[in-house]
Image (spheres, rainbow, N blue to C red):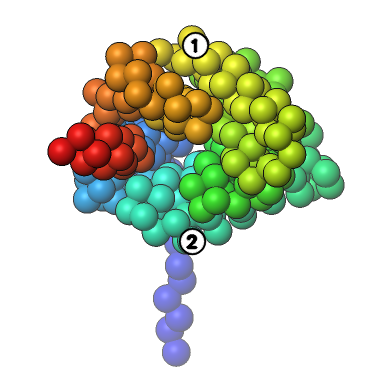
Amino acid sequence: MNVRQLTPPSASICFKVLAQTPTPFQTSLHIQLATHYAENKRDLKAAEIELNLARRSLTIRKRVVGGNIQALEYWLRFCQAEILRIKFQVSKARKLYIGLHQKFEIIQDNNTLSYRDNLELSPLFEWIASLSAQRLVDLALCDGHVDKAEYYFKIFRKTFQHRKSNEIMNEWIPSTQGWIHFLHAKVENQQGKKNELMVQAELNTKKSIAASPTSSVCLCRMGQILWEKAYKHRTDKAQGCFNYWLQAVKSDNQNSDAFACIGRYYMVFITKST
């Protein structure tokens, strides 16, 4: 019986296969486009197309070339979580965020990667893990789980505060800290402690607005803090709660919390006068 012998592919064929294999840059470009379509354009269909292209290119590269592409895989997973969050599939998104954050803690604690791999993985993966921690804080606050939000917030500050990002340091951290103080104040029975928490909430939120005057989330939160603080802020339409909520809506016309607050304002004051 004649057995057909398999000859190794020529160098030109190997080169052609490698040339057609997606590069890490091409993969990252697909992920960046997916994030852009999801966050800025709210075009989830286009985002998912780019995400699938990124997933496909990673699969091809892993089969043909191999090597360390963990950072891109984690970035892809984070992008998938972002799309799920925007589609209001919060529980699925939360699982991905938690997985990414836990993976970073394992790598950090046990040093499971080699020194060279850590150098390659650290900057991008640290950025992904820090954003995942931020999302876990924000989702916990949206769900009203203040203790859980505070837990992730403390982890974030301990692990990632060295990151020199103005948006994180000057806007997100004081805004989140202020909102945690505010939510604690709402359930505090001791008046002295309640007043102290409200002062801290207002100071931190003002600090975040000074850093980012057009932040819709910060403006909306400031209005809610003033609403709870004193009745005079409710009636002062020019400088009080209503003004902050109006600015929040102008800054982001998809901020449903700000619209809800404006609706509450009209319900309380306009219906009383009619």
User: Would residue 24 be found to the left or right of residue 258 on screen?
Assistant: right
Q: Is residue 62 above or below residue 108?
A: below
| Snapshot quadrant of residue 9 | bottom left
User: Label 2: which residue?
Assistant: 91
x%, y% of residue 23? 42, 37
Q: Residue furthest top?
A: 210
Name the amino acid type tagged 2: Ser
Q: Residue furthest bottom?
A: 1
Inter-mark Cα distance, 2 to 1: 32 Å
Residue at the location (49% across, 11% down)?
211
Among the two numbered marks 2 and 1 on one chain, the one whose residue lies closer to the N terminus: 2
Residue at the location (36% across, 55% down)?
88
x%, y% of residue 153? 67, 37
x%, y% of residue 271? 21, 41
Residue at the location (67% across, 28% down)?
195
Residue 211 is labelled as: 1
Q: Is residue 102 visible?
A: yes
Nearer the camera: disc 2 or disc 1: 1
Q: Is residue 200 above or below residue 76?
A: above
Q: Is residue 59 visible?
A: no
Q: Residues within 10 Å of mark 1 (few under 14, many from 20)?
A: some
| Snapshot quadrant of residue 184 | top right
Residue 4 is labelled as: none
